[in-house]
Amino acid sequence: MGNNSLAVLFDLDGTLVDSVWDMLAARRAWALSVGLLSGGYGQEELERAGAYRVYQDPADLLHQLDEVGVRRED
């Protein structure tokens, strides 16, 4: 999953991941991680691995950016 498509819309100082393994790697790097359910892992699995928040898909995340403290760039 590439972060570039969403990076155009907002600036997230952290990682956007869709797997437990990516989440664990982000934790080791001390990065804030936001999970997406598009990778086949469930919400509980991503949260246990360290997700700050978990969203259904990128559209769901965009509708709830205030939860992760991000402002949309216009």
Image: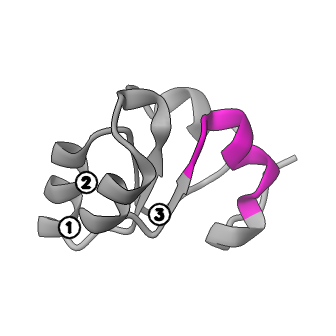
How many angstroms separate mark 1 from mark 2 (CA)? 6 Å
As drawn, which residue projects farthest toward the right?
74
Identity of the residue drawn at 28% across and 40% down: 19
Is residue 44 a member of the stretch shown in magenta? no
The region drawn magenta spans 55-65
Question: Mark 2 = which residue?
Answer: 23
Identity of the residue drawn at 67% across and 73% down: 69
Question: Mark 1 = which residue?
Answer: 27
Percent position (x, y) of residue 26?
A: 22, 59
Give the left or right position of residue 2, taking residue 67 as reference.
Answer: left
- Mark 2 secondary-structure assignment: helix
Label number found at residue 68: none
Q: How is the image coloured?
A: one colour
Percent position (x, y) of residue 53?
A: 52, 64
Q: Find residue 56 and report its image quarter.
A: top right
Q: What type of secondary structure mainly makes up the magenta span?
A: helix
Percent position (x, y) of residue 46?
A: 34, 55
Q: Find residue 68 and report its image quarter.
A: bottom right
Is residue 60 a member of the stretch shown in magenta? yes
Question: Mark 3 = which residue?
Answer: 13
Q: Residues within 10 Å of mark 1 (few under 14, many from 20)?
A: some
Identity of the residue drawn at 20% across and 67% down: 27
Contact between labelled residues 2 and 3, with CB atoms less than 8 Å apart: no
Q: Amino acid at mark 1?
A: Arg
Q: Report the front residue among 66 and 45.
A: 45
Give the left or right position of residue 2, taking residue 45 as reference.
Answer: right
Q: Amino acid at mark 3?
A: Asp
State whether residue 8 appears in this view.
no
Q: Residues within 10 Å of mark 2 (few under 14, many from 20)?
A: many
Q: Looking at the image, is mark 3 or mark 2 nearer the viewer?
A: 2
- In the picture, the quarter occupied by the N terminus is top left
